[in-house]
Image (cartoon, helix red, strand yellow):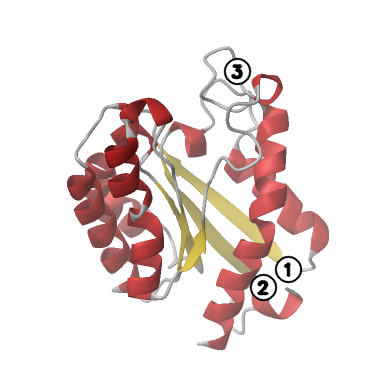
């Protein structure tokens, strides 16, 4: 990982967390959200300086993310070393047609890659109450696109946390700070892999 985080011409590795309320840190205090906890973990383990930009917007859908991605990336002082793309939860909760979500996520990956930025795709799963057909069409989006564009896939962003009342806020949807810590711990190897691919390119 030290090699992956070492940049020839940069003092800082920049990661953008682009997503919805799960990325934004809904209901959490300062420093408790996913980007802040990931940043602390990375800076605590490795010599290189790492900055994780919180580009999460509560309530965002894949359509909303697609509309604002270019603005977010253009507003940065420098091109990031990695974009963690985390969207789709609100699409599923609202019953948006999976074909729309797929088209949006496809376009988001293409837009990030066109800037020469690696993508870590954080997968999402449709809730069971949406029905088997919807689940099948929705859940296949992320592995399909990861294979299509050869990007690192973290299969389920809420792995180890979803449906556990002790790790979620009262709404049963948004993780607590403790839940976020588990999410960060589980996704770390995937972040390492994505940065290693960037370093080797």
Q: Residue furthest top?
A: 170
Residue at figure coordinates x 38%, y 48% from the top left: 139
Please report whichever mark, 1 or 2, sits nearer to the chain's N-terminal start. 2
Q: Is residue 74 left or right of residue 196?
A: left
Q: Is residue 168 left or right of residue 153?
A: right
Please report whichever mark, 3 or 2, sits nearer to the chain's N-terminal start. 2
Q: Residue furthest front?
A: 132
Residue 133 location (% of width, % of height): 27, 40
Which residue carries the number 1 mark? Answer: 48
Binning the other alpha carbons within 10 Å of mark 3 as few (below 14), some (14 to 19) or many (20 upward) gives: some
Front position among marks 3 and 2:
3
Asked if the residues shown at circle 1 and circle 2 are in contact, with their CB atoms under 8 angstroms apart, the answer is yes
Q: Secondary structure at mark 3?
A: loop
Which residue carries the number 3 mark? Answer: 169
> Who is closer to the viewer here, 135 or 26?
135
Alpha-carbon span between mark 3 and mark 1? 33 Å
Q: Secondary structure at mark 1?
A: loop
Binning the other alpha carbons within 10 Å of mark 2 as few (below 14), some (14 to 19) or many (20 upward) gives: many
- Work out whether 100 lies above or below 57: below
Residue 10 location (% of width, % of height): 59, 75
Residue at figure coordinates x 27%, y 65% from the top left: 111
Alpha-carbon span between mark 3 and mark 2? 33 Å
> Who is closer to the viewer here, 155 or 67?
155
Q: How many marks?
A: 3
- Work out whether 180 lies above or below 114: above
Residue at figure coordinates x 28%, y 44% from the top left: 62
Residue at figure coordinates x 55%, y 79% from the top left: 197
Which residue carries the number 2 mark? Answer: 5
């Amino acid at each position: 990982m030290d090699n992956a985080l070492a940049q020839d011409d940069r003092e800082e590795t920049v990661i953008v967390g682009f997503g919805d309320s799960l990325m934004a840190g809904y209901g959490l205090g300062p420093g408790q959200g996913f980007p802040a906890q990931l940043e602390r973990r990375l800076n605590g383990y490795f010599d290189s300086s790492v900055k994780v930009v919180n580009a999460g917007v509560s309530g965002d859908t894949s359509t909303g993310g697609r509309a604002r991605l270019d603005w977010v990336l253009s507003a940065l002082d420098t091109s990031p070393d990695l974009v963690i793309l985390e969207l789709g939860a609100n699409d599923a909760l609202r019953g948006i047609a999976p074909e729309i979500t797929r088209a949006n996520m496809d376009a988001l990956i293409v837009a990030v890659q066109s800037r020469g930025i690696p993508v870590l795709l954080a997968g999402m799963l449709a809730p069971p109450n949406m029905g088997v057909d919807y689940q099948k069409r929705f859940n296949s989006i992320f592995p399909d696109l990861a294979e299509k564009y050869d990007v690192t896939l973290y299969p389920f962003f809420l792995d180890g946390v979803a449906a556990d009342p002790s790790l979620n806020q009262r709404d049963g949807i948004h993780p607590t700070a403790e839940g976020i810590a588990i999410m960060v711990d589980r996704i770390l190897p995937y972040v390492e892999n994505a940065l290693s691919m960037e370093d080797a390119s």
